[in-house]
Amino acid sequence: MKAIEASSLTKVYSDGTKAVDDISFSVDEGEIFGLLGPNGAGKTTTIKMITTLAKPTAGEIKVFGVDALRSPQEVRQLLGFVPQAISVDGDLTGYENLLIFAKLFFVDHQQRKERIQGALEYFGLADRANDLVKHYSGGMMRRLEIAQALVNRPRLLFLDEPSIGLDPYSRRQVIDQIKELNREFGTTIFVTTHDMSEADELCHRLAIMNLGKFAIVGAPGELKKSVGGDVLTVKVSGSGGAELPTALGSVVSLEDGVLKVLTVDGERAIPRLTDYLEDRGFVVESVSLSRPTLDDVFMKYAKAPLHKDVGFREARSSRRSIARHAR
Amino acid sequence: MNNVERVASSAMTIAEMEARKIRHDSTELWMRCVQPALWLLIFGEVFNAIRGLAPGGYSYMQYIAPGVLAQSVLFVAIFYGITIVWERDVGLLTKMLSTPSPRLSVVVGKALSAGVRGIFQGIMIFALALIIGVNLRFDPLDVLGVFIVVVLFAMCFASLSMTLASFLKTRDRMMGIGQAITIPLFFGSNAIYPVSLMPKWLQVVSAYNPLSYVVDAMRSMLLTGDYSGLPMDMAALLIATVFFIACAALMLKRLIE
């Protein structure tokens, strides 16, 4: 069974902003699915629609076969959701934060204590359970939030930028715990992030979203391959003129004497490219090779439309959704 | 569990959350006593000198004690819209609404939280009245009745405030509207002077002011013991409360969209 099935999902806000534009996708059970994209791409709106917090303008969503539009309450019973902002209540203790959510999720009275204790221990918060949360560190708060979503034993967990604002150590802890959750309990995880290395490490499959549409969906490895291969950055001086033969690769950019060439086998291409350029009157000062990362994938699929002439309307709409986000 | 039980259970959970917060830090409650104390001690004392301001041969202090209680509960309740906007801003509201608990229960729960705080205001003002020797009827059933009115009234105006928050959406605007609402409500009611002293048009306004019914109900229980107006007062309060809770529950989604 698919954990999420969305078809022709569209959200138009009352001011005419098209935040999500006719997307269809599915997430398998047990998968870690990443949603990447620039600010204002429509990621949060997509999450809100699946978690039944916002009504789609058009389209259908099924969560484990349950229609999210017709039975939102039933769908919410299957979910855990950790929003972007730190959303634990600082004026309550860690234990109380978990207790309140266990009750709001209608966790059975007998199981409540055990699950809360379990969650506290799993996230290493047991010894601070009775301290007010406002005295916790950022990383502890993040872990408490995930713990909060887990007292429900959700089959599908949404994490909206889980590592934002965390120091590297806390970030590592959170990532490891997400992976372990997925491995141990088979929890399906839907995560949005800006951090490409995190997405690369975490996600089985990911989608890059831009201007309300999915630009591409696939496994991180496939996506990296799809950007074409290795990139050579060549610093040249002198003047010359030449078209690069396709056998050597294709020019990505040439700015301020820095030439970027996309090629298949970078290491072998270095001497050939150097020879070629020097033959044509350039002086090659340095060459560096970089293998594709998700950053490049992101740049290609998420940023490309911004380089082309983006219509005023679209630019405005993405600005607006940023503003909405900030508000 | 059916839906009614779910609403009740979740609403109680949210009110419990508020009670626990108060238990951890009750500074705000104590500070909220200052204003009613000043109303009773200064305003009440000064106007006590004017004979005939309070009808029925009561002292002015006796007369305004229920009014001051109603006012202090109003001030607590009217700012619940700010709380909910704040909880929206930090993501707490979003997370509460992503649980299977019905939306209505979040509104009822918040409204009940205002009721919890209202009860503390009641206790404080009763204590104050005892200390400075304001003679009220402290019959247990009457006191219980007053607390029921306090809770309903707090729920009513907390819901009104949350409804407004769904439209205004920022804390600053809510601060402004809170000020703009409370003062006319207070002075356009029978809280600190009898309606008969008002100009005709204000008397008409006062008849539609929920605060007037609240003060009237409290006065009948704490002062006169004349319950003839009570059914009407309670009916008006109940209708207003149900109406505003329904409004807030319907409009709540505007806050997170």
Image (spheres, helix red, strand yellow):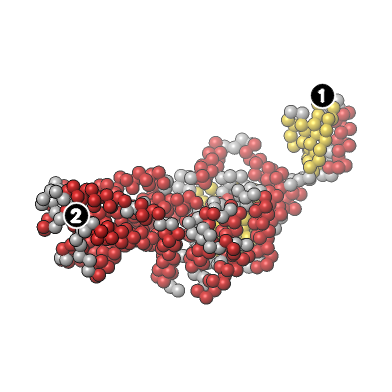
The quadrant of the picture occupied by the N terminus of chain B is bottom left
In the image: residue B172, left or right of residue A280 = left
* Amino acid tagged 1: Gly
Q: Which residue is mark 1?
A: A238
Of residues A232 and A127, the one drawn nearer to the viewer in this rendering: A127
- Residue shown at the point (80%, 34%) measured from the top left: A234
In the image: residue A128, left or right of residue A265 = left
- Residue shown at the point (66%, 60%) measured from the top left: A177
Chain name for mark 1? A
* For residue A26, above or below residue A239: below
Chain name for mark 2? B
Count neighbours of disc 1 (C-alpha within 10 A) and say few if under 14, some if 14 to 19, many if 20 or more: few
* For residue B161, above or below residue A271: below
* Amino acid tagged 2: Met
- Residue shown at the point (85%, 27%) measured from the top left: A283
- Judge depth for marks 1 and 2 and give the one in front: 2
In the image, which disc is placed on residue B61?
A: 2
